[in-house]
Image (spheres, grey):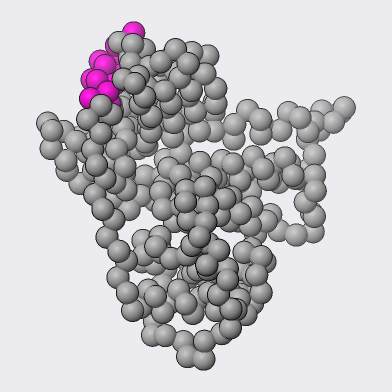
Amino acid sequence: MMNSMDGEDYIDGSGRVEARYLAFLETVSTLRPSLHRYCARMTGSVMDGEDVVQEALIEAYRKLDQFDDRRPLKPWLFRIAYNRCIDFLRHKGVRDEAEAAAAVPEAILPIEPAAFGVGKAVEHLVAWLPPKERACILLKEVFDYSLEEIADLVDSTVGGVKAALSRARTKLAESSPPEKPPRRADPELTRILQLYVDRFNQRDWEGVRELISADARLRVFDRFGGKFADAPYFFNYDRWPWPWKLERGEVDGEPVLIVLQRGGDTWTSYSVIRMKVIGQKIERIADYIHCPWMIQAATSISLVGGGQMRAI
């Protein structure tokens, strides 16, 4: 976790860390990939999903003294993550969709629609469902929660969950997800990303710094958040114990930089770096090098080499 969640604030006078905080950190270490998988499908982006996971875990850590130790941590974390996902989706402009879904009467349809397939196949079909239906179908079909557990997680009733599941299954069985319009390439972003890749791979750190604004913000997930100028960023990359390089590419249709790791005779995708460019300068860097589960959760990954896009 990030520095604010390392447990130092919860050591008593004898040097002992409270048991609940140790249990929290242990649970998070094993739960993190599945929590990210859930948030990635809820938000429709593996990177936005990781951002939401970070916010949810920080919120949970700060509220841990209010948690009832008699209850399991996992459902509580999923509920906080669900609420954070809804906040994210509303912020992204789907408030009307969320409210419309909430306004549907919680009546159970008399006939269950035909099965449409379960498990991982569902994950890539749910992004176009309203948030409540999206959450219920993921929690039921992918994470195998009971109706009662789902009702608690999404702040509903068992009847409401059944209704949401029925609507979601009907939509998934009868309709095809709408195709996303192709993302328009930003020539300036493309140019800056390519320069960054070329200089980074040459370890030309001064050249890389020329691309970054003086006030740029850096977030290395689970390690650092603050001004780029205050971080030993390049030094840390120099210390990686395995060969690596960057390439420009796309993850789930979004232009990013992809960290490649060399193993044997091949390069494989390891992680992602997301950037925001304003006025020919990089203003924000989000580096997910410590979150390799993101690559596994991505729907599609493509690399740009020699000006050509190739799927991997």
**Residue at point 43% right, 26% down?**
284
Figure check: 137 above or below 77:
below
Determine the image quadrant of residue 16. top right
The quadrant of the rendering that contains the N terminus is top right
Extreme residue toward the right, this view: 13
Q: Magenta residues, as a range? A: 191-206
Q: Is residue 242 magenta?
A: no
Judge whether residue 305 can be spotted in this image.
yes
**Residue at point 53% right, 45% down?**
52
Extreme residue toward the top, this view: 206
- Direction from residue 218 to residue 195 in the image, left or right: left
Q: Front-most of 157 and 139?
A: 157
Q: Is residue 201 magenta?
A: yes
Figure check: 160 above or below 33:
below
Q: Position of residue 107 (x, y in %)?
A: 58, 83
**Residue at point 31% right, 42% down?**
254
- Direction from residue 297 to residue 312 in the image, left or right: left
Judge whether residue 35 can be spotted in this image.
no
Q: Position of residue 205 (x, y in %)?
A: 34, 11
Determine the image quadrant of residue 55. top right
Extreme residue toward the front, this view: 96
What secondary structure predominates along the stretch shown in magenta? helix
Q: Front-most of 299 and 281?
A: 281
Figure check: 68 above or below 265:
below
**Residue at point 63% right, 57% down?**
79
Q: Position of residue 95 (x, y in %)?
A: 52, 56
Q: Front-most of 184 and 240?
A: 184
Q: Position of residue 206 (x, y in %)?
A: 34, 8
